[in-house]
Structures are given as structure tokens and as C-alpha cells.
Image: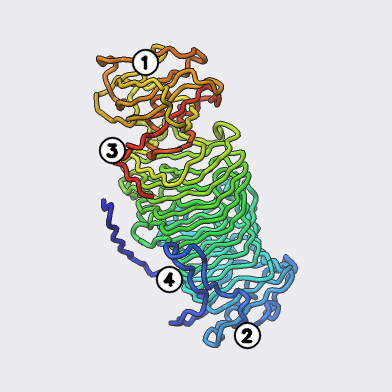
Amino acid sequence: MLNALFIEIHLKVKVTCVQVVDVLLLLALLGAAAPSSVKGSPKCSNQANSGEIRPHSVAITEFGAVGDGVTLNTKAFQNAVFYLNSFTRKGGAKLFVPAGRWLTGSFRLISHLTLWLDKDAVILGSTKSDDWPIVEPLPSYGRGRELAGGRHRSLIYGCDLTDIIITGDNGTIDGQGSIWWDWFHSKTLNYTRPHLLELINSTGVVISNLTFLNSPFWTIHPVYCSHVTIQNLTILAPLKSPNTDGIDPDSSDNVCIEDCYISTGDDLISIKSGWDEYGISYGRPSRNIIIHRITGKTETSAGIAIGSEMSGGVSEVHVEDLHFFGSKTGIRIKTSPGRGGYVRNIYVSNMNLDGVGIALRFTSQYGEHPDEFYNPNALPKVERITFKNIIGENIKTAGLLEGLEGEKFLNICLSNITLNVSSFLDTSIKFNSKLFRYLCFGEGTVPENIVREPETRLLGLENFPPGDPGIHPLDMRSVKPDPTAVVVPLSVLVINGRHLVSNGNGSMNPLLRDSFFFYEDKGKREQRIQLSDGLPWDLPLHPPKEAHYNLPEKEAVLELWKAFATLRFLLVLLLKAGSVSWVSGCAPYEEKHDRNSLKLTFQISKKINSLGYEMSC
């Protein structure tokens, strides 16, 4: 694997789309300018005017449409688009949808078109599946996302377009998705559910000033697109509706998403780039994505997610000014063996969380695979991820990172994070105990310039010795060096007759070099211990030197041998000296927890560089 040099070869497969009307291919892009690169500037620049005046305009009523919410208007929309196609070389045209409830099946857009919805205009998706035709799967997915084979076409769709604007005076596009959700739950679907809006292989896209309701599946899905601006949207679906993601840029670049309120039954925004071997083969990443000023709620998923379909790679993502409340997760990176690809150069700043289950989560065993032909050795790379300026109240679990054996998480930077944890663990989280023997979580405040380059596994706790008794929940906080601490230059520490190291194979891994920790009971320090000589992990149970301490028997001190194991694990996460404050711990799968049972405090030495970890952020 290459660590310093990445050579990206993009094998771009041509996406062919069946034309409803003949669309002329233009060499000049007349639409939106791209957001500036994430590396250069975090702002979206020179966005197209969604109110741009087209030289020709027609109303949908001129083609026989009836806005009574009952009459099916699919032919009217198709005929209007066919007529307006003659103006693509004359500056384009606008299709005006006035106030009313306009029931329709799937219809196609063309280049150089503005679809404008008036204030009280509602485009309603038909509740008959036949009005949503079956189309071929996307090449980067290889099959429908839910079921093998094809998929239903989105309500509004376009392919190979340039200069397309979908906007209005806060008009509404309602997918009437409840019938689709019922079919999903009853397992009576034959094909993957449709999106509400999907644009394929298109450039110069503006979607703004609208409300999207009740999508059958993902709501807005730009795939293989460039220069996409999504602004001032309200996206709503019931909080329990299945897979109703808000906005999912997929294998797309130069995307700007700003000023949206989203409340749905899945991820509010999810960045994707293809699924397993199909995404790897297609090889088109999502990159240069800017997300600003997003507010919303999701009880089942994340405010901002990356993946889990990320096989083409995701990079150069700049996210700022988020407010999520009453949600399951704030930010989540989802990967899995077989995905391949990478997630790198991700920057998240200025996030406010309230009533969120897990503030930050990395998941490396997420999701299913398209078929049996995926490569389980195609491991995703996650590196250069920055989280800073995050405030949270009423958080259940501050951090939950599930590592992947064989591919480290590299250069994870945490800065200025303050989370008020109201309860110990989100018991709604379900784990596969065969994949994760332990739940690992954290909370607290982390200062500037923290970098973590973990060892062979990050949170891959299945490498603990066989028969390990498990790890209880711990609070861990940084403290200033204590000159009164007991110096323990020994390789084994025994507290209350229990050893803090296990019988192992004798391999050396002195992650506790020059570390400091103590046990405290209700704020009163009962014992302070400084490990100044490097305490290895795997040592014989009875080496020549031992130190014995007797601490209060409150709850048997929860067996500080377990505390040591967690402390060692935590040092893999936090490799920086100074005022580190990050509360973390692990607990056996499905074990009940007592948050106040034990508090352990530590400080990481400034000599941490001697362990060979990278310290640049």
C-alpha cells in the first residue's frame, strides 16, 4: 500500500440514458460555477442565480395539466419538456408550475431548463408503482441498492444535462412515500425504491428554495455530477421512514450544500461513491464538497455521514456550522471490509449538538454487500480527519469508534470539543458480538493539535488475551503532574491482590511509558500512581518485581486490572501531551453499566514521540 503517494486512475464508464426528448449536447457550460476547492477556500463562490431569467417560459397548464391532486399529469409534464427542448440553443426556457396539487408519474428534465414551482404549488408523486418505470442499476452499484436487478426511476430525473435549475418560491415536491414504505416493510417490493430527485452525469446544477417531502427512498441524489449547488431547502420525512436520506451526493465533485433544514428517517446528508467492487471499478470519487449551515434531526442515523457506499473514495470535504438535535449521531464515517476506497481530508468545524446519542462515530463493519464477488481484502483507508469546535449538551455517548484490523485510522485530529454527557451509554445501539467484543466510547474536551496514528488496530479490542475478564466503564481525565504521586518503576502492579497485567507471550508494548493515573472516590484522591518506567502489556504474571497497593474496597475497585487494560487502550487513541481531556472506556458486549463506579485519571507524557507516532495535524 502506498502511504505517501496516491495514484488515482479513474476508469469512467459512460452512463447512457434513454432520451424522452433529443437533448443537444453543448460544449459551453452556461450554469453554475463550481464551489471553490476545499483546499483553497471553505466558501462556495460564484453560485448561479436560481432566479435567472430564461428567454422563454410556459406554464404546465398550457399542456393540459390539472392541479386537483387527482388527475394524473405525467403526459403534460413530458409534453411540456418536449416542447421546451427546442429552446435549448436559444438560451433555455422555464417551466412554470402554478399553485395547485399536480399529481404525476416520473418525468425527465432537459438541459438549460428552469423548473419553477410557485409558492402554493405541490408536485405529487403517483402512488402507483407503474408510474415509476424500471431502469438499469447504476454502474457503480452493479444492482439496485435494496434488491438485485433494476430500480424504479426517480420522480424527477435527468441524465447528461448541463445548466439545470430546480427552484421556486418555496413550492413543494411530495413523493407520497408512505405506500413505498409499506411495501418495503411487507417485503413485497420487486425493485429498489425510487428517489424523489436524481440527476445523473450532469453539470451546472442548482436546486434551491423548495420543500421536499416523503421521498420513497433517498430524497436528492446527484450521481456522477459536477458543479452542484443545493441551497435553502426544507427536506422532511417521518423520523421512522426507512432510508429517506436527505441529500446524498454520490461520485460527484464540486458540490455545495448550504442553508438547509432536514428531518428524515435516515442520514440527513450522506456522501457516497459507489458500492464494493462496482464502485472500485467505476472509480469516480466524491470530492471538493462544501457543507454549511445545516440544521436537522434524525432519530435513526447521522446528521452528516460518509458512506457506507464509498468505494470510489471520498476526499476534500469541508463542513461547518451544523446544528443537530434529538438525533442518534452527529457525524458518522461508515466503512466495511470489501468497500476499498478511502475517506481522507475531511474537516468538520462549528457543530452544535443537543440530545444526540453519539456525537462522533467511526464504523468499520457497516452494511451489506451487493453480491458474493466482493473482495473482503479490499480495506478502506480512513485518514486525515479533523473535528474541531464542537459543543454538545445532553449527549449519551461522545465517541464510538469501531476499528478495522489490518488498516489503521491515521491522523485523526480532535480540537476544542466539549460534550456534556447526560447518561452513560446509548443502550439502543445494537452490536454484533462476533465482530465487536466490546463497546468503546468517550466523552470530554480535547485541545488543539491532537493527532492520533493508532497501532495495528484502533478499537479492535478482540486482540485482548483469551479469557480476559472484560473492561468496565471508566471516566478518564487529564490532570497536571502530581509531585506526590507514587512512582512505580515496576513491570507489574498489583492492587487489592489483582494484577494489572495479564499472562501473555512476553511481547513488549510499553504504551504506558511515563504515564500518570490515580483512583479517586467522589473527588477525593485515595491513591496516586505514576508509571514512570514503561509498563508493558504482555508480561509473565509473576516477574521479579511487583508493587502491591491496597485501595478502598468500594465495589472491589472494579478490578483495576480491567482499568489498566482500558487505560492502555485509551493511550492508543490520545497521543499528545498537555491538557488532554477525553473520557473513554470500554465495556463487554451487552453488559449493564454503572457510570459512577470508577474514575481513573491519566496524563500522557510529552515523550510520546518516542513511540513513533506522527504528531503533525
Q: Quadrant of residue 576?
A: top left
**Residue closer to the observer: 150 or 390:** 390
Residue at mark 4 to residue at mark 3: CA–CA distance? 55 Å
**Mark 4 / mark 2, whichever is N-terminal:** 4
Instruction: Count the labels in the image.
Output: 4
- Location of mark 3 (residue): 610
**Mark 4 / mark 3, whichever is N-terminal:** 4
- Location of mark 4 (residue): 16
Q: Is residue 321 left or right of residue 586?
A: right
Residue at mark 4 to residue at mark 2: CA–CA distance? 29 Å
- Location of mark 2 (residue): 56
Q: Identity of the amino acid at label 1?
A: Val
Tell me if residue 414 comes above or below residue 585 in the rendering.
Answer: below
**Mark 1 / mark 2, whichever is N-terminal:** 2
Residue at mark 1 to residue at mark 4: CA–CA distance? 69 Å
**Callout 3 touching callout 1 (CB < 8 Å):** no
Camera-nearest label, 1 or 2: 1
Mark 1 residue element: strand
Mark 4 nearby-residue class (10 Å; few <14, some 14–19, many ≥20): few
Residue at mark 3 to residue at mark 1: CA–CA distance? 27 Å
Tell me if residue 559 comes above or below residue 159 in the rendering.
Answer: above
- Location of mark 1 (residue): 494
**Callout 1 touching callout 4 (CB < 8 Å):** no
